[in-house]
Amino acid sequence: MLIDFALIGGTGLDHFALKEQRVISVKTPYGTVEATIGKDTNRELVFMSRHGQNHATPPHLVNYRGNIWALRELGVRKIIATAAVGSLSSNYRLGDLVLLDQFLDFTKSRPQTFYEGGTDGVLHVDMTDPYCAAVRQIIINASEHLGLVVKNGACYVCTEGPRFETPAEIRMFQYLGADLVGMTSVPEVVLARELGMCYASIGMVTNEAAGIADHPLSHSEVMESIKKLEIDVAQLIQATFEL
Ligand code: HPA
């Protein structure tokens, strides 16, 4: 069974309507991973929930290696991911959908590679274009088809979480050129690249970052914003798969 396309659903996207759905378990060197296989029109797709049902797994404990390995085992070559993000820039507003094109990595405790030396070997994977331009273009085409505005290109800073950032950290990230902040795109995009997969991520702007917002941040604020974007994102992904 080989399936070309997968969707990794981030915060607020823990299921995706597919026909003839079935849940499968895939054994990997990093543990057993669950995925859903189903059909969208006539094409088979894999859906994977990054945080599991009810957001049970926090960003720093996601089994990124297991998830990406399992998708490769299923034959996946192209991944679309969603990611809740806070905005650091007036160019990106609450409710915007943005395709990431660069990242800054401020994670601290996550396995970052499949290549741990010894029998695994060593790989220094190229990160000039971390997010796949070809899949991003398909998403842009789908958005134009739907009449939905999707911004193409933003620099994402990945923090370790699960806490939100301090305003001082956000000011530092702004100086460094970050546009959006989230907790999950690294190492997910890196691992996909290590296995030669084409990976794109749709940032969903759920809040202004700490210190820009005039109130303390909360997970419920993020979830409420995601709810408002859910239908647009599902349509965008469906239209992308159909192109
Ligand atoms: N910071 C980190 N991760 C996030 C944010 C944020 O402001 N919003 C959504 N995910």
Image (spheres, rainbow, N blue to C red):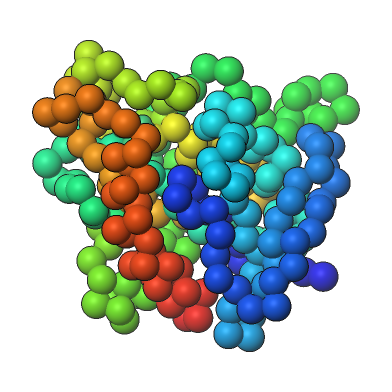
User: 179 and 168: which one is in front?
Assistant: 168
Looking at the rendered structure, the number of numbered marks drawn on it comes to 0
Instruction: Say which of 227 and 105 sits in front.
Output: 227
Q: From this view, report whether residue 60 is shown above or below residue 191.
A: above
Image spot of residue 97 (x, y percent): 29, 56
Residue 175 percent coordinates (x, y): 20, 22
Q: Report the residue at 66% width, 31% height from top.
A: 113
Q: Is residue 177 visible?
A: no
- Where residue 118 sits in the image (x, y, percent)? 84, 22
* Rendered residue at 69%/71% (across/down): 21
Task: Left or right? Give the position of 180 relative to 44.
Answer: left
In the picture, the quarter occupied by the N terminus is bottom right
Q: Is residue 114 visible?
A: yes
Q: Residue at x 75, y 46 (%)?
A: 33
Residue 167, quarter of the rendered image: top left
Residue 51 percent coordinates (x, y): 57, 42
